[in-house]
Image (cartoon, grey):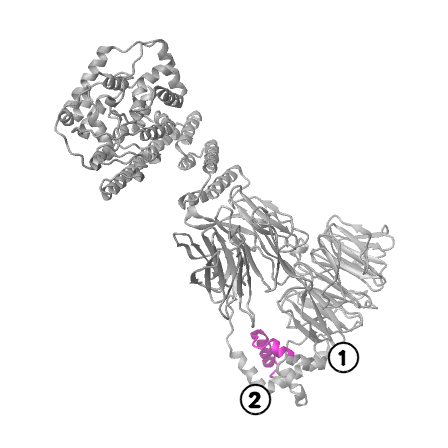
Amino acid sequence: MPAEKKPMRYAHLEGHTDVCFNETGSYLVTCGSDGDIRVWENIEDDDPKSISVGEKAYSFAVKNGKVVTASSDNAVQMHTFPDGDPDGILTRFTTNANHVVFNSDGTKIAAGSGDFLIKIVQVDDSSVQKTLRGHNAPVLSVAFDPKDEYLASAGCDGTVRIWNIEEEVCEVNLSLLPKCNDVINAKTICRLSWQPKNGKLLAVPVDKTIQFYERDAWMMSFTLSDDFVTQPFNVVTWSPCGQFVIAGSIDGRIVAWNVSSKACLERVQHDKGFTVCCLSWHPKLPQVAYTDSEGNLGVLEHVCQGGGVSASTKVSSAATKDYDDLFDGDDDNEDFLNGDMIDHQASEGNDDDDNFMPVSGHAKKRAILDDDNSLDVPSLKASDAEKPEGVDDDQSIKAQAYPYKPSYSGPMPTPPQKPFQSGSTPSHLLHRFMMWNSIGVIRCYNDEQDNAIDVEFHDTSIHHAMHLTNTLNHTIADMSQEAVLLACEGIEELASKLQCLHFSSWDNSKEWMVDMPKGEDIQAVCLGQGWVACATTAFLVRVFTVGGVQKEIFSLLGPVVCMAGHGEQLLIVYHRATGFDGDQCLGVQLLELGKRKRQVLHGNPLPLSKKSFLSWLGFSAEGSPCYVDSEGVVRLLNRSLGYTWTPVCNTKEHCKGKSDHYWVVGVHENPQQLRCIPCKGSRFPPTLPRPAMAILPFKLPYCQITTEKGQMEEQYWRSHIFTSYLDYLAKNGYESDENVKTEAEKEQQELLMKMFALSCKLEREFRCMELAELMTQNVMNLAIKYASRSKRLILAQRLSEMALEKAAELAAAQQQEDEAEEEDDFRSRLNAGYSRTSTEWERPSSRAAAQEQEVEMDCGDEETEEDQQPEAPSVNKKTSTNPFRKNITSPEQPTSKSGAIVSSNQGRVNPFKVSASQRSPALAGSSSRILDNMSKLTKKTPTAGNQATRKSDSLVIKPLAPRAKSKQGQGTLFQNIQPKSSTNSKKTQEKENPSSQPDTNTMPEKTEPKKTKTGFQLWLDDNRQDILSENPDVDESEIIKEGMSRFRALTNEERMMWTEKAKGDDSADPKKRKREQQENCKSQEDPEDETQDHSGAAKKRKPFEQSANNKLSAFAFKKE
């Protein structure tokens, strides 16, 4: 009868797993990568005894009440069996031992390690040791001769060696295996096995065959193979009777032979095709235990029952039925059958073999034999070849037609990845994590004693820990600062349910539950801010409020893989199509479920590493979507580069072993941290003991990262990527820390300057220009100075030209923004019927008030009577708009009762300020002065904002009759009073940041006798009217406070200049002041004439001295 395969069960974590029976067969013992030895009474034992031997156990052996283990601490330990009490350390290596075995009587152990050595140690006295040296690579396996004369070993150097134990020498060196540099890279572990009792034959798994070598002669006697095996054999072992051998391959196929008849007796296929790591015969029963590379344990019963040739006959007939079902529709097997039949059609048939027709008609890859025992196989196949001529034999007709069936040889489709919950461990585990994120941990315990869920919060101020009874068998969970979400699959009696524990609710009802429609199961869930979402098998996404109100529902574009939520964002990954050659074909959708609902990513392909799958999906703590694939590559959504995915870390670079992984639980952009749990030999951590958290740094995969240039480039762009979320937060109205952005920009500019200096040293001037494109104006100033001091004058000149272009572009962009804002303000007033509301008062003052202010300015106390020109909105009013008014906000002002009055009193403007069009010639100045202008512009900006703010605070609406005055006239006046080239830095600031001045008729005159004045007092006298124009109703103390704040804003050079001026100050000539006043009055009385001679007047008139504007302004306002 064929072997009966018992269902496999979980035994250890993923990784290499060993298994064996004790001498009596009463216990089944296993060890794995979790560092435990487990003692099972049988395959159905649900409570095996565990013996912890270290972090990882590579191999073990049991005999005479002792168990020896090769563990990860580079030692070979011994424990009592089955109690598991420590019994000492037998030997140590410099690296871990890969294989350990007992000899036949249990008095010695042999161990082969990764340091190329083999040690033979006495169990009773570990000081008695023998060391065998000769392998040139790590040792894969060792095997004792039953007579204790020889020891066989296999190594990564591709050799199988036979050692004489007594003489400690190598008798034979056979090159049979592929070479490799480490055990983890070995294609097979090549477990050798001697024939029991006499040790006559040594079985060696070589590729897809088992080779047998005779004792003493060390010549290959024969080989066994089977076409059922398509991948190399990994392990081989003899039955206790010495009549049978069984071998397992790296693709999960197990084959057993009768050695004497060389007939294949058993063929078994692993359910999932995992590598068979170990095989062990029961000492008394026809039973074989085996383990795979995923830590699973299985048992085959009734193996090779009957034995000998008769057993071969029975198995052949019985195996026919078994393999008909197993390989139905398998093209490779059918082609082999047809090929055999065609090859033997010319052979002589044997009509007496008709009773073997069922076997040969569906022959399954029979053994390749090297002796006369195989003569009956061709005769069977020859008889089969004669059958296609008969019409009544369906099997023969089917076989005859197969050679004409086309076969597919293209790329093979990849099985689609199953849905999973990010931050959870596999659901088949009894103790597992249902969720681990930045909020807390959800554990599930499902055993005979208890089926419960524990919820624990990292921050206990959010909520206390919870213990829930899992009566509905929930398998999916998520948690946020508002709620805990649970979901279970549906069964025949009950529908799939979604349960929410809304612990942040202020009412008493904190729990709600929703049943899905019949036949619709929940596959993924997620929580956001105020909403809940679940994806179902009906390709639907259902959205609820956190209180349980059903909201949107929409269809998925494919089967869901994973979901994640953060704030208003919902991230969905699904299968776009079938992948090929091990690659998954996934798509991603990103939606915003806030007030402005929109779809950001419309099913874009999700990039993954080659032959990998998605292992984690979520958001950073700052709200940027990110994910991790099975190769350990972390990718972050780069919003600044068209919503592309940028790899920011590779966790595999931090793993020590090939089978080690990092289990990601959170991503943080500020500070730049990847929070994860190291898992040794597995992809996920155990629930107990509580795993330790590790923090990994981010590193972009730039080229030449070991060089100084590559490191600075990586740091710059990483900083740029990890601060792009600040723009997203500001754009969507979220709070953001400006200090973070400022520090990041400072760091980026420092890196640019360092790269600039490095490029200068390497004489890469074109590269310097490319770096300068990314610099701000202040840093470009430093770059120009550095280039000049480095005597790279051409580079400095080009940088100066670039600075001029940038300054011009900045000024043009600023003016364009102001014009657009002014137009929006005018349109809003026009639509509102010129009604002034509190909301409008919060905006900066309009140009209508500036026009009225120009009309109020006069040379005397009385206004001249001229024809009034009605005020109308025009484009010309925008030319002198304050370029910094965008950042100015003013508190709410009282609403005027008269709309006409309001329209003529919407603000006050200094008639002496320089317009943007008149500042433009300054930008065309020499390259040596452009940086000074830019630095002063930067420093003066906040002062202008303060002035405009204070002005709006004290704005008084007065019904004044406007005077007719054209912009051209005002522009001519500006040109006529331009200062000389010796104008101090204060005048430059006034040009770049003009301030408004109100009508002096409403302000009392303040004059004091001349005394010895300080620099501040002298500066205050010249700027008092500027302060009063913006704050007409303040007292003297407020004027002094405001003056002090402005005086402090000046540069050190400017303050020193005023101090020196105060020491040798002479009062201004009153005649000169009178002459300036008369000229100003004349320019205002004849605006039209000045308009006509606008261009000529500017050229003929000479500019006044340094403080001409200040003196003229003081004279105009103080005249009685």
Where on the picture, by quarter, is residue 403?
bottom right
Where disc 1 sits, the SS reads: loop
Majority secondary structure of the magenta segment?
helix
- Along the line of sight, the residue nearer the viewer: 538 or 721: 538
Identify the image quadrant of the N terminus.
bottom right
- Whether 833 is drawn above or below 336: the answer is above
- Please tell me which residue is depicted at 66% across the width and 51% down the height of the picture: 690
- Along the line of sight, the residue nearer the viewer: 351 or 459: 459
- Along the line of sight, the residue nearer the viewer: 1113 or 1007: 1007
Residue 462 relative to residue 253: left or right: left
Under mark 2, the amino acid is Glu
- Whether 376 is drawn above or below 466: the answer is below
Give x and y (percent) for residue 3. 70, 75
Q: Which residues are magenta?
A: 322-345
- The alpha-carbon separation of the residues under discs 2 and 1 comes to 36 Å
Q: In the image as oriented, which residue stretches furthest toward the left?
A: 867
The residue tagged 2 is 389
Where on the picture, by quarter, is residue 257?
bottom right
The residue tagged 1 is 306
